[in-house]
Amino acid sequence: MPMDLGDTSKHDQQAAWQPVTTPVLLGVLLFSALALWFGNHGQRWFPVLDGANLLFHEFGHPFVGLFSAQLMVYGGTLGQLIFPVAAAVQFKRTGATGSFAICCVWLMQNLFNIARYMADARAQLLPLVGGGEHDWTEILSRWGWLQADTRLAAELTALGWLGIGTCCIWLFKRWRLDRTAI
Ligand SMILES: [Zn+2]
């Protein structure tokens, strides 16, 4: 009996993935292409979306600051990652395949946004909200990695490409699976 109960709760946590329609696949691919384009060209800024990311970033600082002044500087980056992660976890639970993929791409797109800021740690050319301290100058200085700012940012960007590519391949595979399944 306890085993049955255990099985039931396991099923409740993860619903089966919903079928992927072609418009959903194309929509996620388009969103991914835009994320790659905006994240790697010009100002490296995805209109509207990076505005939202910045909002979550600015929310993250004081929130983490409630618990630790020392860790407050990490709160911004944490803030902009936690929202797509929380949304992705929720969509995974309900088996909402397309929405889950969108959130994963959004999470990876955030890495471009973070890399843009990280690469600026020594140069400090980016305008800062409220003109406060530069997060990545502070973080990388603490770790003794300030000289590696652009290299670390390039690695983070590569991770973003890899992550978005993986999301697209995963969704494409699910889309194909739905078409071959009888
Ligand atoms: Zn910040």
Image: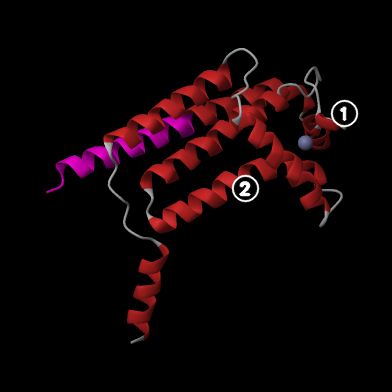
Q: Is residue 103 left or right of residue 2?
A: right
Tell me which residue sits at (37%, 80%) in the image.
5
Residue 120: image location, x then y, percent? 75, 21
Residue ID for mark 1: 131
Q: Quadrant of the N terminus?
A: bottom left
Helix, strand or loop at disc 1?
A: helix
Q: Which quadrant of the view contains residue 113?
A: top right
Return the x and y of residue 174 as percentages of the image width and height: 28, 42
* Residue type at numbered disc 1: Gly
Identified by mark 2, the residue type is: Ile
The residue that mark 2 highlights is 82
Residue at 78% x, 51% y is 64
Check the image and report above or below for 179 versus 93: above
For residue 151, side relative to residue 162 (left or right): right
Q: How many marks?
A: 2
- Image spot of residue 95 (x, y percent): 37, 54
- Mark 1 surroundings: few (<14), some (14-19) or many (≥20) residues within 10 A: few
**Residue 144 among magenta residues:** no
Residue 117 visible in image: yes
Residue 101 percent across, percent down from the top left: 42, 41
Which of the pair 58/144 is nearer the observer?
58
**Secondary structure that dominates the magenta span:** helix
